[in-house]
Amino acid sequence: MRHRRAGKVTDNLWYLGREEAGVYLLEGRDTSILINGGISFILPEVLRQMEDFGIAREKIGKVLILHSHFDHVGIVPYLKRTNPDLEIYASPQAWSIFAMPKAIDIMNSFSLIVARQFGVEEALSAYDHAWRDDMTGVSVGEGDKIELGGVSLQIMHTPGHTNCSITAYEPERKALFASDGGGIPFGDTSFPSANTNFTQYAESLERLLPLPVDYLCADHYGYLTGEEAGTFIALTLEETKKWRAYMEDVLRRTGDLDAAARAVTAEFYEKMPSYFLAADILEGVFKQMLKFLAKNMA
């Protein structure tokens, strides 16, 4: 079953934000962790939801960033600046990206584009949310654990969506936090966002397949429970193969990266007109995916 409204997922686990982008709060005995940094324009809603749900912000001692894209790190700067003791966890590759001025500029500009698209730019301007070079934290990767007191997160390196992508798994609740590396549950299917490397994306999904999952906690369009949660990674793997074949076919027909990216984008929005990303941003994503395929096809 698919859920897209903010609220309690299960004991000690909350979903905050809105359906286009959300974050998860996992509570331990000693501290709580925010999983995923979300997109910046959800910040006012997340703060309001914390008050409505009786979540004490001062008990949130950690934030886990699952990859470095702008729509997964947006509320982190404000939370860190209002709580300097907050520990931020991300992969070593993500921290390298956060040190690049060009990457920071792209994150901030894309965040404002989407905030403007949803008509919340003015409300967001009341918060110091922009990324700058003052964000530091802890590197985590394959085999690491984050302890919360009676609750722990196991970390896996799962590249393919990005080189910096990691996945978190909480075994007691069988909760999987794979970010876009596990697929985006848009509509009634899964969109396989294999942005940088289709082959690695599929390999990462294969590694996730054996995990028992009762709660599939996606970053976009909510979370899944029950049987659908347990079969979603398999669905994403199937859709990955279909998308790869489709995009390779578009490349053969057009013979040009730009033309192929425009064609894929146009068809995508015909089928999914309410998708949250602006078309020019998504066209850039598709071009990146197509570049990988063109290189491998050659």
Image (tube, rainbow, N blue to C red):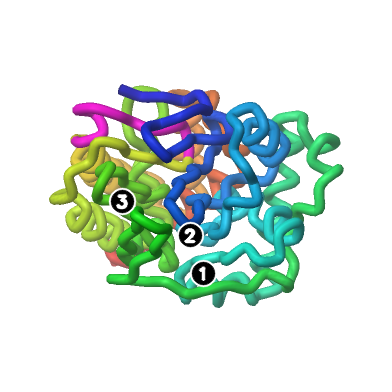
Do the numbered discs 2 and 1 sit on residues whose CB atoms are within 8 Å? yes
Give the numbered dot on residue 214. Answer: none
Give, as a three-letter code, the residue at label 3: Glu
Q: Is residue 76 above or below residue 262?
A: below
The answer to whether any part of residue 267 appears in the image is: no
222 in magenta = yes
Q: Quadrant of residue 159?
A: bottom left
Q: Nearer the viewer, residue 36 or 265?
A: 36
Please provide the residue range marked out in magenta.
220-230
Rounded to the nearest angstrom, the CA distance separating label 2 from label 1 is: 6 Å
- Secondary structure beneath dot 1 equals helix
Circle 1 sits on which residue? 94
Q: Earlier in the sequence, mark 2 or mark 1?
A: 2
Give, as a three-letter code, the residue at label 2: His
Task: Tell which residue pokes out farthest to the left in this image.
Answer: 210
Q: Position of residue 43 (x, y in %)?
A: 69, 41
34 in magenta = no
Q: Position of residue 24 (x, y in %)?
A: 48, 43
Q: Nearer the viewer, residue 199 or 145?
A: 145
Q: Which mark is nearer the camera, 2 or 3?
A: 3
Circle 3 sits on which residue? 170
